[in-house]
Image: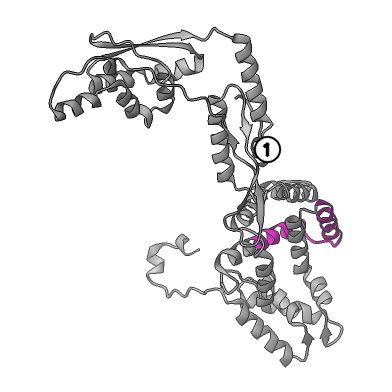
Amino acid sequence: EVHKIPATILSRCQRHDLGRITLTSILDHLERLSQQEGFDIERKSLELIAQEADGSIRDSLSLLDRVLSSAPSGVIDHKSVLESLGILDRQMLHDISSCVFENNGAKLIESIEIINDSGIDLKKYYSDLIEHFRNFCVIKICGKESSAANIPNSEKEKIYLTALKLSSNYLTAILQKLLTEETMVKYSSHSKTAIEAVLLRLLEINPGEQIDQIILRLDTLAKQVAGSPGGVQYSQPIAQEIPGNDMINEQVLPLPKTPRPNPKPEPPMPNEILEKPTVSDSQTAKTEEKTWINFLKKIEKSFPFIYALLSKTTPNDDGKDEIVINLKECTAFDQKRLASKKSQLKELCKDFLNKQLVINVTSKTISLNNNIKNETKAKHAARSHPLVVDAQKMFDGQIINL
């Protein structure tokens, strides 16, 4: 912690920063010492000791000395190393990750029970599990030759073959979930139950659908439900390749399809009914631009919901300095949104048409029973849509209002 030393002292000292030793260097050094001392120890056992040393030669020598001093003979098997160091075999980490990837909850519970019965510290095991899934993410993104994963080459190859079938987004989601729940596991008085709960929650992560895709489709569904009071129709499911997944093509939930209304002829606008005086071509083009239709096109991108409301009505232009719009059967929600943009809309109309815009709104009173029935039907369709159900499970939430 060099930052805690005053600068006046640092300026009078020689500073030597000791870096971390690579796993390969530690492994070769331990293997050479074991041969010099006359002990026959498996290479995977030395790899485990080197990993536990975490880049420190001194720690690796201390661990090796503990193993050699407790050995009854010159031949030391892998099981004896595990018992001497009180650590877990790396294969158990791969067993847990396989259960998660295969969505096998029963085998997952059995594996945690075996780990607990072996006397291993479960909180230490949870930290190893986070590091294990972190190696999955690194190898998936950077490749098996990356030095960022501080594990032996044999384990890199094993993780690489497994990660080929998985997307990087799915692995990142698992790692993020483990890091989020680390505090709960650390301070829980029931470590085993806490770890079981976290790992079972990993099974709920969908390896196919990504969060951004679900949010985009939920937005599309909300817009279509709002614009279709009679309900929502669904298209046939289509198969789509999941981005980031090189091996699996899964069936993607279909997007809802809005029923297309019968096209209605647009009523003639007042500016179009009036006889056009004989003017030059440039003046004619300028006059045609200042029409109600062109005004609607101008506000379509900025205020799409206002465009949808105004396009259903015919303006009352009596030649004076104002245009009167009568909106009938307008819902309270549309009235509230219209009121928030009313001043901006009037300014745009004044600048474009050089007229004052007057909007008269009447509440929706016709076919009340049918509209309530259609609205209830649309809400039920939205609640039961597979995208909404998946989103509720993923975010562990509930629908408050539609």
Q: Quadrant of the C terminus?
A: top right
Residue 292's image quarter?
top left
Give the camera-side residue of 197 and 256.
256
Q: Is residue 1 magenta?
A: no
Q: Is residue 118 magenta?
A: yes
Taking the view exactly as shown, the residue that stands out farthest to the left is 280
Which residue, given by chain and number where applicable, does mark 1 sit on?
Answer: 386
46 versus 160 height, above or below: below
Instruction: Judge from the rendering whether residue 268 lies leftward or rightward of residue 282; answer left or right.
Output: right
Residue shown at 54%/7% (left/top)? Answer: 365
Q: Nearer the viewer, residue 397 or 289?
A: 289
Q: Check disc 1 and give the amino acid type.
A: Pro
Q: Measured from the top left, where is residue 75 in percent x and y?
A: 83, 86
Rendering coords of residue 259 (x, y %): 57, 29
The segment highlighted magenta reads 105-133
Residue for point 37% across, 30% down:
302
Q: Who is closer to the viewer here, 216 or 6?
A: 216
Where residue 161 appears, as percent x and y from the top left, is 68, 69
- In percent of the image, x 54 and y 40: which residue is there? 216
